Structure formats: structure tokens, C-alpha cells
Amino acid sequence: MNAYPHLFSSFQIGRLWLKNRIVLSPMVTGLAEDGYVTDALSAHYAARARGGVGLAVVEAACVESTLGREGQAQLFIDHPKYLPGLTRLAEAIKSSGAAAFIQLLHLGRQATPDLTGGLPPVAPSAIPDPMIKVMPRALGKGEIDRLVNAFAESAVLAQRAGFDGVELHAAHGYLINQFLSPDANARTDEYGGSLENRSRFLMNITDEIKRRAPGLLLSIRLNIDDFTEGGLAPAESVPVAQALAAHGADVINATCGTPASGLKSIEPASYPEGWRVYLAEAVKQAVPIPVITGGIIRRAAMADQIIRDGKADLVFLGRALLADPAWIVKTREAREDEIRPCINCDLCIGNVSAGKSVTCTVNPYAGRDAAAPYLYGPQTAPAPRHDNKEGSRATWVIGGGPAGLAAALNLSNAGWRVDLFEQEPAPGGRLKAASAPPFKERVGQLKDYYLTLLGRSDVTVHTGAAVTDPAALAGIAANPVPDRIVLATGSRAAALPVPGAERCVSCTEILEGRAPVPQGNVVVIGGGHTGLETALFLAEKGASVTIVEMLPYLAMTMEKKNRRDVINHLEAHGYVKYTNAQVKEITPDAVVLARMDAPDAAPVRIPAGAVVTATGFTPRRELYEACTALAPDVRVIGDARSVRTFADALKEAASL
């Protein structure tokens, strides 16, 4: 029996039949080259189509590459020369039974001079974007007509390429949204002022596409709330949706937020699942055409309930399908505990924003899907165990943290006979500590995912195996003579070389529950990613927290949205910070600082009932030489190689 009958029911958009209600959200991947479709881009969409989506909406394609582009690695759809690649892309999606739309975009005032050849960006009015802060040039009426034609010509190209539909990006502060939003549109002609006038650009594009590309379905990605002062709000966006339906639009893809609205358009981990569904529900109650919703939806139960309750007709998934393209197959086969969870770290978004191609912390094959060993099914029962694996090579994996767990599973799936050694009572390593701070429960889900797969694998697990001499493992290993040893022994907390450091407790001891949670005035030494999250953990437990950091800013390398979110929560708790500060001494009741930006200033004394260190980690690879005496092939991965992120550890595990 299907546990989610509403989510997996078929649906019609006009004459187009969809096999289920799941839509792949148009996330920019940075995998295009000079506007052209690449093999990597096609593989990315093909993987998610094979995974079972009903509809895939291809990421934003630029309708005017001179002034409207988003980045160097964006798709273009403003010339017939892009048609062959777009055709291959549409075929790659549709060959697996998914419908295919492509999103059409013009950045307007969000374009930057480095992408426009030094020319000013264009906009409805000469009002700078509050984040880009570049003065745009107001469009003339003739230019507006030309852009209406550009959108329509791009839609015709999409139809020629074989796409079932196009989606106009009228959200997130881009050009169409700029015309709609009062805070960006100060025109006094027929394109400004009243809602009808501000909607005219969008309605003209809709009419022209319907006239020039009959049969092509049209979705509108519409901001229901800009969440900016004076911006588009539901009182106006819902009537816009009604007008779009009257003009022949086939779908409303409800979304919200702009770069200036903070964290509303791409939410960090603290936002509750399904928080923005109410916006789609308001549209659903007002229009006769289908409505799509999404954003921080991770569970099929939530998606099914949205559709069952009539709040929307379809649900989009973005980051969830980046983390696991087989999400749908595993859900249908009641294997939800095998879904690789998105942990909401937003590495994917941070990389693309920095001009790189998409990647994913938990899915090392994101962006290189052609090489991925994705299991789409059907697999209704666990695979048979092969305890002997005659002829297989043997490997030991020493260390059961994220790198070791991933390495053991990857090697076992590749046919190796694997022994995994972990000194703690259960594998997991730093995943346990990383899941303890507020809003990090998805990291705990990642740990559970690995342990579930480990329990269903052929890997022989030895816990409580404190490895000081690898040779001693031969007596307990199922494979006493390994062909390869993978050293994944992780890292240890770095020592703090100051007087009184013995009074400190490390952040991992606190987060793993090996030390009591301190109360009162607590000083956290180290304001990086780990330090911020540890400080928030302590603040949520009632401590008064002060953070000390040597650099000018806290968590400078942390993904921007999650960094802002953690700092917002710390500010709500009234935390105190000292940057450009170096710890000189820790006394029984205080931490003594020197101000690095004011070397002649008197030392600062901070009262401290407890001191927690988050000053980084050092690799644990003392066993390397001993391992090389036992096996001809020794690999060092994860923090044992160099202290970095989960993403680096999992990529190294995948490349063994």
C-alpha cells in the first residue's frame, strides 16, 4: 500500500500528465559553460528525472545575456545557437518519464557591471538594489517592448527544444519582480503606479508567449511576499495571480523573499519545515489553476499532507533532491531511513554564489552525477549478504567517523571485504557533537543514515577497538591480512598554549555530553563555525556567553546565511563578543585578553565561571607509519589527513 497516496497521485497541468506531484525546483548549478548546456548539466537533471520526479524545472536561463545574466556559468536561451544543447537537456529529462519546464530570467538591477561589460544594469526605475548598490538605468518604453519580445522568443526556443513548458521568474527581486514591487518601481507611465500598471510588463510577456508558442505551458514563479518594507505583499500578489490565470497562465509557483529580505528566500536550518506553505494556500484559494509550494520540505508525510489538505497541488523539492536524487524511489519503497538527508548547511548555495559549480556536503557526487553510483531501485528487500566475497580484496578502515563510515560503505559496495574499527561504543565520530547545537538535528539524521546502511551492509564492525598498534587488530579482524588500510582516525581538539589552559573544557566534550554543561558566565575561546554553534548551544542552555576571536570577524568562512542566522540567535540571547583579541591568561575566575587592534591598551579581564575552547583541531595520524608496515596500500582521509569539513571527508571517501 502506498503510504503517501496524495503525493504519488498523478496530476494534469492543462494537457500535460504528471506521474506524481513532486517538482524538481530550479536550483542554479553553475554547470553551464558560456551559456551552453554541458554533459555535467544534463547528467544532473537526468539523475533526478531517473529518481522519479513528476516535473523538472530547469534552472534559470537568461533571456538577454548582455544585460540580464546572473553569472559566468549560467544557461542562456537568447539565441538559436543554444538550441542543440537545450534539446539534449529536454530529452535527458523526458526520457525517464518526467515532464520538463525551463525557467526564463532577466536579472534587471541585480546584474553587476562585471557581468554587463561595464554597462549599468537596467530596471523599471533608477533605484539601486539595496544589496548590489549599483545605480541602474531606467528602461525606456521601447526597451520594455524589446524585453517582452526577448522573453517570448526564448519561450519559442524552449518549445523548439522540446520542453513542455517555461516558467517566468517573477520573484526574488529579479526584473519582473522589480516591476511588480512598489519599492523598486517608481514609474509614472503605464508601467508604474497602480497594481494594474505594475503588472503590465508581466501580463504582456504572458500574452506574447501564449500567442507565439501555442501549446507551450506557462508557469509563473511569483513572489507572494517580498518581505521588504514597501515591497510586494499578499494583498497585491494574490490579485496578480488571479490576473495571470485570466491571461492564460497554467501554473503559479508560489515563493517569497528577495536578497534584501534577509533569510526568507533561501532559508537556513532554523526555519521550520513547511513554514511558507501558507503563502501558496492563499493563492490556491483564489485561482482556478494549479499552485506549487515548497521550501524546507524534507518529509514525504509533510508533502502528502499539504496536498491532502488542499493547500497546494504540487510540492517542489530542491536541496533534498540535491542530497539524494533517489529520494522519491526510496520513499515509494518504504526505505525512507535510507534517504541521504540534506543537513541545510547551504554549501550548495554558497558555492554557486561564489561563482563555483554546485556541490553538496552529504552527496559527494553532486555536480558530477555521471560518475555517481545512485541506487534508484526497485529494491524491495535488503541485498543478500556476501560474507565471504571470494576473490575480493580485504581492507581495514580505522576510525568510524563520517570519513570512515562513508569509506567502509563505499568500499563494501565496490566489492571489498571490509573491517571497520571504532574505539567508541558506536560509530559516528564528530557527527554526534555536530548534531548537538540548536537547529543541527539533521546532522544527527545523517549519522542515523550511515548507521542504518552500515547495519544492512557486509561490513564487519568492531567497536570499542582502541587502536594503538594496528598489528594487534589482525587477531580480531575477519580479514587478518589487509590489502589496504584506510586511516580515518579524525582529529583531536587543539591545545591552547596559554597559562591556565588546564582549566578549560573543549567544545567537543560539552557537545558530546562527556562534560557537564556550564552555567553562569561562560567564555568561548574561538569564534569560528564551531565556536559560534557551541556558544549558541550554551546560550540556549541558560549560560551568559562571551566569544573571543583573534580575527576581525566571527566565522569568516561560514556560509553566509547560516552565519547570519546563528548570530541573530546569539544576539537575541544578549551574547558579547571580542574580536581582534588574543587570550593571554586564564585565571580561576577570568579570561585575560590583549586587544590585537590596540596593542598599547590595557589587558581586558572578562569574568568567567567556565571557559570552553573551540580553537580548532589537529589531525590524528600517528598510526600511519605502523600501517604502512602492514599493508601495501595505506590511504589517509578526512580530518586525519587535514582538518576540514564533512564535505571534504565524504569526497575523499568516495574517491578511494
Image: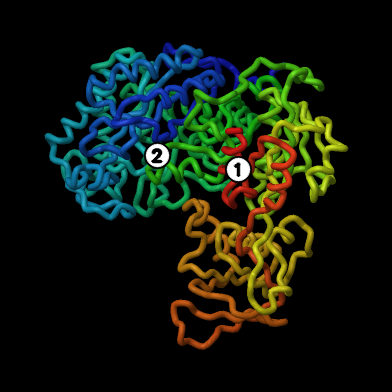
Give amino acid for label 1: Ala
Q: Secondary structure at mark 2?
A: strand
Q: Which residue is found at the position 69% from the left and 57% from the top?
A: 492
Work out whether residue 5 can be spotted. Answer: yes
- Direction from residue 373 to residue 55 in the image, left or right: left
- Quadrant location, the C terminus: top right
Q: Nearer the viewer, residue 239 or 208?
A: 208
Give amino acid for label 2: Asn
Q: Which residue is found at the position 74% from the left and 29% from the top?
A: 394
Classify 213 as above or below 563: above
Tell me residue 411's x, y (percent).
Answer: 68, 29
Q: Nearer the viewer, residue 236 or 140?
A: 140
What residue is shown with label 1?
A: 649
The label shown at residue 559 is none
The label shown at residue 223 is 2
Q: Secondary structure at mark 1?
A: helix
Mark 1 against mark 2, which lies toward the viewer? 1
Q: Which residue is found at the position 74% from the left and 18% from the top?
A: 391
Work out whether residue 234 can be spotted. Answer: no
Binning the other alpha carbons within 10 Å of mark 2 as few (below 14), some (14 to 19) or many (20 upward) gives many
Q: Which quarter of the picture shows residue 422?
A: top right
Tell me residue 349's x, y (percent).
Answer: 46, 42
